[in-house]
Image (spheres, rainbow, N blue to C red):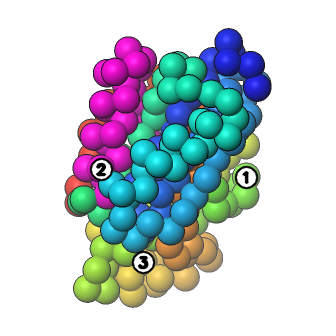
Amino acid sequence: MSSAEPLHLGIDTSTAWLGLSLYCPRTQAERAGTSVRAERRHAELLVPLLHGLLSEHGLSPAAITAIGCGTGPGSYTGLRVGLAAAAGLAAGLGVPLAGTGSLEAAAWGSLTPGQTGWPVFDARRGNVYTARVRRTPGGVQVLLPARKLPLAEVRELARRLGEDVIPEPVPAAAWIAARAAAGAAPAARYL
């Protein structure tokens, strides 16, 4: 990979997973990525994993031209870790920073084009964070915005509509990276 081509970094720490992606907007392809089950160790793992990903491909942080970060909903601490790291890197590198919903990123990675479903992230005490989303050929359409609901209620809604509940999907950091230069403000969504 040439270091002269634009390279977007995608970060998501909203769930028990930590996802990183290096994405080339010119070719519209992920160049490298990783997802690890971090549980509550996002702060401990994020920088070493990013350093390893860059080093493995002979890149330095200076190769990054934009940063995208998952904005949740999800873990309060996880979101703070990801957003703080993304903001610090963006400021230090002087590159744009944008936020993308983590449920939309999960839908991109879990649904096939034309499929509608309900990705769910654990919100504890029998509740989940969810949204009703449809994967389109070029994106994700939000049909019902993110909200916190009892899991039983989400299952019933999905059953009535003949749609799938996607339990604990991993947000696609490549989807977040693809939106790094043109996404929304990087503000956490706490529900």
- Residue at 37% over, 25% down: 90
Task: Provide the residue designation for mark 3.
Answer: 154
Secondary structure type for disc 1: loop
Answer few, some or many: residues within 10 Å of disc 2's Cα (few below 14, many 20 plus, some between 14 and 19): many
Residue 92 falls within the magenta-colored stretch: yes
Q: Disc 1 to disc 3, how far (Cα)? A: 22 Å
Residue found at x 68% / y 30% = 58
Quadrant containing the C terminus in the rendered view: bottom left
Gap between marks 1 and 2 measured at Cα: 31 Å
Name the residue that disc number 1 marks. 113
For residue 81: magenta? yes
Q: Where's residue 166, x and y in %?
A: 56, 73
Position in image of residue 168 (x %, y %): 50, 72
Q: CA distance from mark 2 to mark 3?
A: 28 Å
Q: Is residue 13 left or right of residue 171?
A: left
Q: Amino acid at mark 1?
A: Pro
> Could you tell which of marks 2 and 3 lies nearer the N-terminus?
2
